[in-house]
Image (tube, coloured by chain):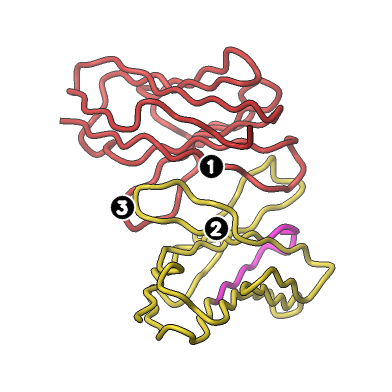
């Protein structure tokens, strides 16, 4: 299994809703990432987990809350989002933290905040 | 501040032609330079990557040229095909950088038949 899966593919939520994005990989990778990508822009790093511990938080607002329950799963909990948070949310994983190597990206969750 | 600068923003090439995308960086600590290909509605996928100990890497129709002294690297797509039409991102990472991947701004490539 050489892929990163993300659910749901699409999500529409109101500003008062609470929802979660899910990411899963079974490649034995020990680093996992959340990125946000706006249309026609490159991915922007949000969070990095190394060995299931949060190692980087790129000054992301607290309405985004990441969670890494185990080495295969990564969640992003969403609460009280704003319309400008609408974007493609990408999950990625890589074999080893702190060693530059390929990051494998999932297909993303297209989030729309009304 | 954009850590990796990429040009052109968009590129139109005839089928069979050569597509060339250029990137430049300033941080000499960068030691891993991947190129990602992204189709609409999909996540980026690694196309090819290079480390600074070599000046060129070729995989099929895709070649990375790397100039360490100029702090520049480029992607060449030979015999471009309509199926290559996508957005291409160069990126850079440093071993000391806690896996922070810095992306260029992207190039939208269109290959016309």
Q: Which quadrant of the figure contains the C terminus of chain B? A: bottom left
Give the color of chain B as drawn.
yellow
**Depicted A64 relative to depicted B7: above or below:** above
* Chain letter belonging to callout 2: B
Chain for colour red: A
Tell me if mark 2 has few (under 14), some (14-19) or many (20+) residues whose alpha carbon lies within 10 angstroms of its own.
many
Q: Mark 1 points at which residue?
A: A105
Query: Residue B108: where, in percent of width, then height?
Result: 39, 69
Q: Position of residue B48 (x, y in %)?
A: 65, 62
Residue B57 % position (x, y)? 74, 71
Q: Residue at 23% x, 16% y: name it.
A: A17
Q: In this view, does A42 lie to the left or right of B56?
A: left
Which residue sits at x=82%, y=71%?
B54
Q: Mark 3 points at which residue?
A: A39
* Magenta span dominant secondary structure: strand
Q: Position of residue A108 (x, y in %)?
A: 41, 38
User: Per the image, is A57 magenta?
Assistant: no
Q: Return the residue at label 2.
A: B36
Q: Are marks 1 and 2 in contact (CB under 8 Å)?
A: yes
How far separated are the C-alphas under marks 1 and 2?
A: 10 Å
Residue A12 occupies which quadrant of the picture? top left
Label 3: chain letter: A
Label 2: which secondary element = strand
Contact between labelled residues 1 and 3, with CB atoms less than 8 Å apart: no
Q: Do labels 3 and 1 share a chain?
A: yes
Q: Do labels 3 and 2 share a chain?
A: no
Quarter of the view holding residue A68: top right
């Amino acid at each position: 299994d050489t892929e990163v899966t993300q659910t749901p593919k699409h999500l529409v939520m109101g500003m008062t809703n609470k929802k979660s994005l899910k990411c899963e990989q079974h490649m034995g990778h020990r680093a996992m990432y959340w990125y946000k990508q706006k249309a026609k822009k490159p991915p922007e790093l949000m969070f990095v987990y190394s060995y299931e511990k949060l190692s980087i938080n790129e000054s992301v607002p607290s309405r985004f809350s990441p969670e890494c329950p185990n080495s295969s799963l990564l969640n992003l909990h969403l609460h009280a989002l704003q319309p400008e948070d609408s974007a493609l949310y990408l999950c990625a994983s890589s074999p080893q933290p702190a060693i530059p190597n390929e990051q494998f990206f999932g297909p993303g969750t297209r989030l729309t905040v009304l | 501040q954009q850590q990796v600068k990429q040009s052109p923003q968009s590129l139109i090439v005839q089928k069979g032609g050569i597509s060339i995308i250029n990137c430049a960086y300033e941080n000499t600590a960068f030691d891993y330079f991947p190129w990602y290909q992204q189709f609409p509605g999909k996540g980026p996928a690694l196309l090819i990557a290079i480390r600074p100990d070599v000046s060129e890497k070729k995989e099929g129709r895709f070649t990375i040229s790397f100039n360490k002294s100029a702090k520049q690297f480029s992607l060449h797509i030979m015999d471009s095909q309509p199926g290559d039409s996508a957005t291409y991102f160069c990126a850079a990472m440093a071993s000391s950088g806690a896996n922070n991947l810095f992306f260029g701004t992207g190039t939208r490539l269109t290959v016309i038949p």
